[in-house]
Image: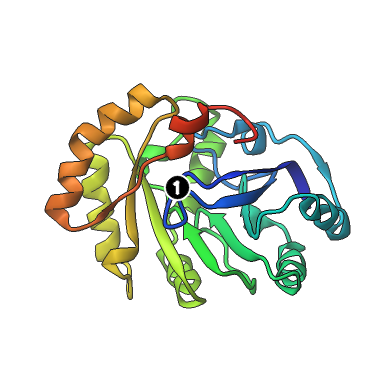
Amino acid sequence: MRISEIFQSVQGEGFLTGTPSIFVRTSGCNLRCWFCDTRYASWEPEGDSHPVEEILRKIDAFRAEHVVITGGEPMIFETLAELCKELKHRGKHITIETAGTLDGQVDCDLWSISPKLSNSSPIDYINEAWVRKHEAVRYAPQIVESLMSKGDYQLKFVVGSILDAEEVLEYLSHLRGWDRHRVLLMPRGVHTEELDIQLSWLADWCKTHDLRLCDRQHIRWFGNRRGT
């Protein structure tokens, strides 16, 4: 499994906001979202491949009971299931952060699924072949439904405009079995000022449509820095 970084911090997004967590950031992704804030794990993946045993040793060096496996896209790695199995044996709570484009038999405690909307298209930033691949892969409601059926989940949508928020409603209209209380809308941005601008309209929008609002608290706590 190719790893970009492993560190302990505090979860800043979703249901477990504020929870001390060990983050395992895999390197490599099957999408190219233009606003990705971890390009070193997606557009320009860095890091070496590590056996599960070595990853576990690094995790064991930290104290937190929660482990967040993120990326990049961790679901591209065949050894993810083995890593999760060993973490469960250690009594860890496991969150997998995924774009919901790949399925697999993986045991975790929380699926944090972030389906990518049309606002993620890299059309102005990369070659046409990657644009086509991104668009062909990003929309996969049947896979999202499968992941939802495996256990506890949250659906986390990144939005940067009212049009994006309206697209979330359209997406949900084609998704079966979703729970309104598990749908979160999160503002796009990597600076506090950007987040505040988005929240100025998004909070009211979520209130009107009875959907949950999700901030990016780690940006407020630590800034847009690696290892946080």
173 to 164, vertically: above or below: below
Determine whether, in the image, residue 121 is placed left or right of residue 211: right
Q: How many marks?
A: 1
Determine whether, in the image, residue 36 is placed left or right of residue 184: right
Residue 52 in sight from this viewpoint: yes
Q: Nearer the viewer, residue 223 or 147?
A: 223
Hey, which quadrant is residue 106 in on the image? bottom right
Percent across and percent down for residue 170 are 24, 56
- Secondary structure under tag 1 reads loop
At a point 72% along the width and 58% down the height, the residue shown is 77
Percent across and percent down for residue 197 are 26, 27
What scheme was used to colour the molecule?
rainbow
Check the image and name the residue furthest to the left. 208
Q: Nearer the viewer, residue 109 or 43?
A: 109
Percent across and percent down for residue 137 are 50, 53
Q: Nearer the viewer, residue 187 or 35?
A: 187
Check the image and name the residue furthest to the front. 63
Determine whether, in the image, residue 194 is placed left or right of residue 34: left
Hey, which quadrant is residue 203 in on the image? top left
Residue type marked 1 = Glu
What residue does disc 1 label? 13
At a point 76% along the width and 45% down the height, the residue shown is 3
At a point 48% along the width and 48% down the height, the residue shown is 18
108 to 185, vertically: above or below: below
Q: Quadrant of the C terminus?
A: top right
118 to 101, vertically: above or below: above
Determine whether, in the image, residue 213 is placed left or right of residue 34: left
At a point 31% along the width and 35% down the height, the residue shown is 160
Category of crowding for the residue at label 1, using alpha-carbon neighbours closer than 10 angstroms: few (below 14), some (14–19), many (at least 20) = some
Residue 34 in sight from this viewpoint: no
